[in-house]
Amino acid sequence: MTDAGFATSSDGTRIAFTRHGDETRPPILLIHGWAQQSVCWQPVTERLSDRFFVVAMDLRGHGASDKPSHDAAYTDTRLWGDDVKAVMDATGLQRPVLTGWSYASRVIAAHVATYGDAHLSGIVLAGGILAIGRMREDWMVGPASPGLDRDLYTDDIPRRLAATVRFVDACTARPLDRRTFAELVGANMLCPAHVRRALFGADVDLRPVYASLGCPGLVIHGTADAVVSPETGRTTANLLPRGLHRPYDGVGHAPFLEEADRFAADVAEFLSACR
C-alpha cells in the first residue's frame, strides 16, 4: 500500500505524509532535512516497505505541507514535536523508530523533549545536527554548511537557485545521477526563502535531550560529510546512553543516497533489534 494524506498539528498547520507498505508491520517514520522533502527518502522506502510500515513526512514549510508566513511557526520548539505526534496519530504508528536526516535531529529532539521517548522503539540520526543558532559551535559545521552561504536565504530566485545547486552538490561525496540530483534541487526550491531563514532563527542545544534519551539510538554519519562535521556524529553517538555509531567511510552528508543498500540494511537490523 502506498498513499498520501495530511495530519493537522496543534497550531492548525497541515503536515503532509506518505505511507508505504503493510501497516501491521513494524513502523518507521522518516523525517527529512533542511529545505528538502519526503521524496529524498525514495531509495529507503523502496528497500524497506516490503518488510516494514514506512511513513515519510514533509516538515512544516516544506514540500506539500503548509508554509506559515510567521517566524514563530518555525522557532517554537514545541510545534516541531507536535508535528511528529500529529503524523503518528494520523497514521496509527505504535512504537515507531524515528529516522531523521540532518535538521530532522532538531525535530526528533523537540518531540522527545515534549513527549518523552517511552512510546518510541528507537531513533536513527543520519548526518544529524546537535545545535542551531548561537548554541552551535564551530566544530559542528562543515565547509558546506547552509549557514555559510547567504544566497541560500535570499528572495532573489536566480541567486537562491544557484546556491541550492551548490548545496545539493555538496551533500554527497560522489556525484548523484542527473535525475536524482535534479529532483533534490527541485524539492529544495519548494522551500521558500522566509522558511529557510526562520529554520535557524532559534537558539537550541540538542545535547541535553540526547544525553537523557532512554530508547536505543543509531547514528549514521559519513566520514566525508562537508555539511555537518563527522565529529558531530561521533559526539552524538557518545552522548546517547544506548547509542551505536556507524561511520560510512568516504560518504558525504546523505548516506541513504550514496549507500542506499547499506543504509537500509543497517536501519532494518536496528529496527528489528529494537522491537
Image: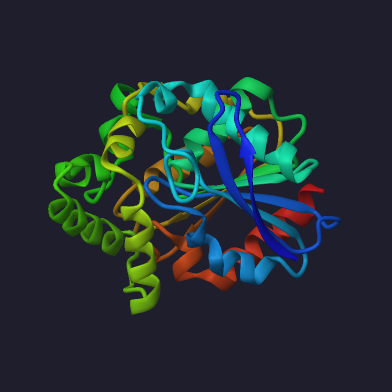
The residue lying at 70 percent from left, 30 percent from top is 117
Position of residue 82 relative to residue 16, above or below, is: above
Lateral position of residue 7 relative to residue 129, left or right:
right
Lateral position of residue 172 relative to residue 239, left or right:
left
Lateral position of residue 181 relative to residue 2, left or right:
left
Percent from the top left, x then y, of residue 152?
21, 46
Residue 54 image-quadrant placement: bottom right
Q: Is residue 210 visible?
A: no
The residue lying at 63 percent from left, 71 percent from top is 46
Position of residue 17 relative to residue 61, above or below, is: below
Position of residue 17 relative to residue 268, above or below, is: above
> How many numbered marks, from 0 up?
0
The residue lying at 29 percent from left, 22 percent from top is 134
Percent from the top left, x then y, of residue 7?
64, 39
Percent from the top left, x then y, of residue 119?
77, 33
Position of residue 42 relative to residue 138, above or below, is: below
Where the N terminus falls, by quadrant? bottom right
Q: Nearer the viewer, residue 138 or 132?
A: 132
Q: Nearer the viewer, residue 121 or 39?
A: 39
Q: Nearer the viewer, residue 1 or 48?
A: 1
Percent from the top left, x then y, of residue 207?
48, 27
Q: Is residue 108 visible?
A: yes
The residue lying at 42 percent from left, 38 percent from top is 67
Q: How is the image coloured?
A: rainbow
Residue 70 image-quadrant placement: top left
Q: Nearer the viewer, residue 33 or 266?
A: 33
